[in-house]
């Protein structure tokens, strides 16, 4: 039995069926409560800080649940290595998670979503630590990258391995919850960066407007861009071959994207309603929705992907009744407030400066883009 696992192995364990494993977080209680990995593969979560193992080893050990395997995690994989050693000396099957939360924050899974035969391959790139979902739409040796995270190497290496040229980079909207990697990926790959004008006010970025459609690879694929204001004024959804809808934060697995980011919730709720009923509501209800975020491990399927059906999401959002929709959104908005870091993240996503340390700090925690999760 290995005494340590890399982060990809740890991610597979999290996604697996309940293995009876314990995840032992050796960070402080505060850090642990703010943000820790989660998934069906972990039966029990426990937080016993490293400092307790140093100060009172017997006391700390007594707080670690019994299990066949105990995965030990910390910020960078060093304190957890020490704790793993202590546990193993006492006969417990402890396994260190290499790189800790630092590695977890940077980890991405790439999942091929669609069946062959569409003339296109759509990949969902999942960053499970933040619940961020991005996309690679590939055809005829070219790729369109949508909502790239700031770990641009993930997309560049994938493109290189699969002999793809990155032809265009787009953000569905100006992200407020996480740092976008779109502009950087654009300059590294030489592809144009697209963000709707309405979301790019005051931008210092090298940017192009959102086109009406993208031409990627050969003529077999059709990528239409649909303006869907509401979550932001420039929110754009991308419809691939009339079957896959990259929805940004307009539609999310647990509901609609919060319309209060511009502090004009009433006005933007109206826009959101129009976008849902007049634009997305006119599409085939069986269209596969590919959102920009998931809010929890439970929203991923057995492949590790997150995908929903348009008709189901629109029914849940109650778009059939305008009054009920608006009242429901307003009520939930009144109970939620946007995290303080969002204003700073938006500035950086418009080309403002950020030190690597500050960037790391700003990205701590799951996204809070959905209205329902923001109020949970
Ligand atoms: Fe968003």
Image (tube, rainbow, N blue to C red):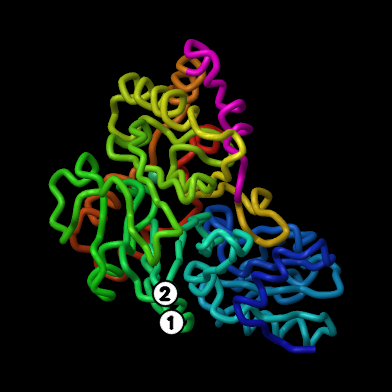
Answer with the quarter of the image where residue 360 lies.
bottom left
Q: Secondary structure at mark 2?
A: loop
As for residue 28 lying within the magenta part, the answer is: no
Front in this rendered view, residue 232 or 191: 191
Give the residue at x 30% y 52%: 345
Position of residue 372 in the picture relative to residue 269 (left or right) = right
Give the residue at x 42% y 33%: 258
Query: In the rendered view, would you say 247 is above or below 162?
Result: above
Position of residue 298 in the picture relative to residue 217 (left or right) = right
CB at mark 1 closer than 8 A to ligand 1? no
> Residue 341: in sight, yes or no?
no
| Residue matched to label 1 | 163
Cβ–Cβ under 8 Å for marks 2 and 1:
yes
Q: Quadrant of ligand 1?
A: top left
Q: Which x, y percent locates residue 324? A: 53, 13
Which mark identifies residue 141?
2
């Amino acid at each position: 039995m290995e005494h340590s696992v890399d982060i990809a192995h740890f991610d597979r364990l999290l996604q697996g069926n309940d293995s009876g494993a314990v995840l032992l977080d050796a960070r402080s209680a505060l850090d642990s409560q703010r943000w820790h990995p989660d998934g069906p593969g972990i039966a029990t979560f426990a937080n016993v800080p490293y400092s307790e193992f140093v100060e009172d080893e017997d006391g700390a050990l007594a707080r670690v649940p019994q299990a066949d395997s105990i995965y030990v995690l910390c910020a960078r994989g060093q304190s957890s290595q020490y704790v793993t050693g202590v546990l193993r000396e006492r006969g417990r099957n402890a396994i260190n998670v290499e790189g800790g939360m630092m590695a977890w924050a940077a980890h991405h899974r790439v999942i091929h979503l669609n069946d062959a035969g569409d003339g296109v391959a759509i990949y969902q790139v999942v960053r499970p630590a933040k619940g961020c979902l991005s996309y690679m739409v590939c055809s005829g040796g070219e790729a369109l990258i949508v909502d790239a995270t700031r770990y641009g190497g993930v997309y560049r290496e994938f493109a290189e391995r699969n002999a793809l040229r990155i032809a265009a980079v787009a953000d569905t909207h100006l992200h407020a919850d996480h740092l976008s990697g779109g502009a950087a990926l654009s300059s590294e790959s030489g592809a144009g960066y697209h963000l709707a004008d309405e979301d790019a006010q005051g931008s210092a970025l090298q940017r192009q407007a959102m086109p009406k459609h993208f031409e990627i690879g050969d003529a077999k694929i059709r990528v239409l861009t649909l303006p869907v204001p509401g979550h932001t004024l420039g929110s754009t959804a991308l419809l691939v071959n009339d079957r896959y809808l990259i929805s940004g934060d307009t539609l999310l697995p647990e509901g609609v994207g919060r319309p209060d980011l511009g502090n004009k919730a009433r006005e933007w709720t109206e826009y959101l309603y129009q976008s849902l009923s007049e634009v997305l509501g006119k599409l085939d209800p069986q269209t596969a929705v590919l959102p920009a975020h998931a809010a929890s491990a439970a929203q991923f399927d057995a492949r590790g992907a997150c995908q929903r059906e348009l008709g189901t999401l629109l029914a849940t959002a109650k778009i059939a009744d305008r009054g009920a929709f608006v009242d429901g959104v307003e009520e939930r908005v009144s109970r939620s407030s946007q995290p303080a870091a969002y204003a700073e993240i938006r500035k950086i996503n418009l080309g403002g400066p950020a030190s690597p340390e500050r960037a790391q700090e700003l990205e701590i925690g799951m996204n809070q883009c959905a209205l329902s999760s923001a109020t949970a």
